[in-house]
Image (cartoon, rainbow, N blue to C red):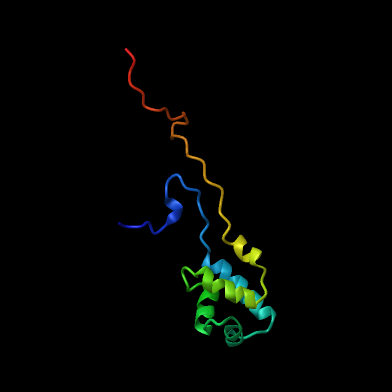
Amino acid sequence: MKFPTDLTKRPGRPRIRVMQPADIGILIRQERQARGWSLWHLAELCGKSAQTISAIELGESKNPQLGTVIPICDALQVPREKVYDLLSPKEASPRQPPANGRKARKATAPTS
């Protein structure tokens, strides 16, 4: 069984905003630099490697895991709400009407 790689494209499901590496990376770098901390200092505090933190900050980590991001943000004392806002689900998108602008009809058996 093959699993979909992009869960936002599953029909009938609400669209979920995937964490943007650039968003979380910018947040982490700004908070770290505002405190005057080096990558190594932050790595020591959160238990993650400086390489991992650097990859997230630079957007090189294509899909940073929540289990990695939360300890980093906790060490920086970033409110979790701020992190979760980057992950907040979007509203389910309404089904698109047909191109001709008419409502789609259900197929029914002809009545004769």
In the drawing, does residue 83 fall left or right of residue 56?
right
Please state the total of marks drawn on the protein image. Answer: 0
Of residues 42 and 97, the one drawn nearer to the viewer in this rendering: 42
Q: Where residue 59 appears, x then y in whole percent?
A: 51, 72
- Relative to residue 31, is residue 108 depicted above or below? above
In the drawing, does residue 60 fall left or right of residue 112?
right
- Quarter holding the C terminus is top left
Q: Quarter-wise, where is residue 28 in the image?
A: bottom right
Point 42% across, 46% down: residue? 11
Of residues 31 and 44, the one drawn nearer to the viewer in this rendering: 44
In the displayed orientation, state which residue is furthest to the right.
Answer: 35
Of residues 86 and 77, the one drawn nearer to the viewer in this rendering: 77
Q: Quarter-wise, where is residue 69 in the image?
A: bottom right
In the displayed orientation, state which residue is furthest to the left.
Answer: 1
Q: Where residue 31 appears, x then y in whole percent?
A: 66, 75
- Quarter holding the N terminus is bottom left
Q: Where residue 67 appears, x then y in whole percent?
A: 52, 71
Q: Where residue 5 appears, x then y in whole percent?
A: 39, 59
Of residues 49 and 47, the one drawn nearer to the viewer in this rendering: 47
Point 61% across, 87% down: residue? 41
In the drawing, does residue 12 fall left or right of residue 80?
left
